[in-house]
Image (cartoon, grey):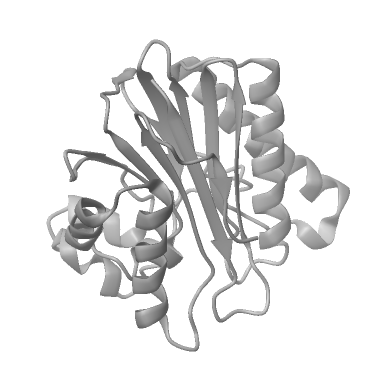
Amino acid sequence: MQLTIVTLSKPGGRRANEDACGYYTVADISCCILSDGLGGHEGGAIASKLSVEHVLEAFKKSPQCSIDNIKLLMHKGNNAVLNEQIKNSSLSSMRTTAVILTIDSKQNKACWGNIGDSRLYCFRNGRVIKQTKDHSVPQMMVEAGYLKPEMIRSAPGRNQLYAAMGDKNHFEFETVPEPFSVCEGDVFLLCSDGLWEYVEENEMERLLQKANSANSWLTMLETQVLRRGGEGQDNYSAVVVWCGDSDEDTTQIGG
């Protein structure tokens, strides 16, 4: 199976971009990661970049698509942030979210894990079939029955997280329970809250059904974000993985 991977990361209306993302492919296995340094914490941009760099470096040394390797990569990213906190006391409060995806395009399987409120979506036939859960206060309220899922985007305390990389007392990530079977035509989206907060799932689906490539879909998603974000638009980032034959080159957008 051929994969097309496209990335996007922009500061929006902010002075600095505290998001980071990247990917690396070894033989038939690809690893994608997206991180969002937490606003209000000094060094958020450093934390997100550290997680991306160290996760991809660890993947290069152990290019596997397995649940155990996702756990290893999560710990590598977290340790990088914690070690930098020790080296530089002014960065002791830096934190970052992370969502990691590995895909074996030969065996047609995928594994992923997440911490914080950066999300992974999997689309099949233009519909969402898998979605990670946020480690946030509103998500806890949804699970407790106090809040409807569609209200997460506008809920008070929407940005309050109870788990993140760099928080040694609350490093509680989740992984998919077992390797996921990937089908031709599946599409994965990794994104920070600066994107999903402004594009609801039904809109993601509608735009995907109009798109003929990873690039075209990502452009449509960005248009929605910019239309709704306004002057105070948060940083927004995404990684799209298009599974199947494509004439499109593997491309990177933004910076």
Of residue 121 and residue 94, the one placed in the foreground of this image is 121
Examine the rendered structure and indicate whether residue 66 appears above or below residue 71: above
Residue shown at 48% from the left, 17% from the top: 65
User: Is 60 placed left or right of 200 in the picture?
Assistant: right
Residue 1 appears in the rendering: yes
Residue 207's spot in the image, x, y percent? Answer: 24, 59
Residue 196's spot in the image, x, y percent? Answer: 35, 62
User: Is 15 placed left or right of 3 in the picture?
Assistant: right
Q: Give the quarter of the figure containing the N terminus.
A: top left
Residue at far top of view: 107
Q: Give the quarter of the figure containing the C terminus.
A: bottom right
Of residue 42 and residue 185, the one placed in the foreground of this image is 185
Residue at far right of view: 87
Residue shown at 68% from the left, 22% from the top: 60
Examine the rendered structure and indicate whether residue 113 appears above or below residue 81: above
Residue at far bottom of view: 231
Residue 173 appears in the rendering: no
Of residue 146 and residue 117, the one placed in the foreground of this image is 117
User: Is 139 placed left or right of 73 in the picture?
Assistant: left
Residue 108's spot in the image, x, y percent? Answer: 35, 16
Residue shown at 64% from the left, 47% from the top: 166
Of residue 197 and residue 137, the one placed in the foreground of this image is 197
Residue 231's spot in the image, x, y percent? Answer: 49, 89
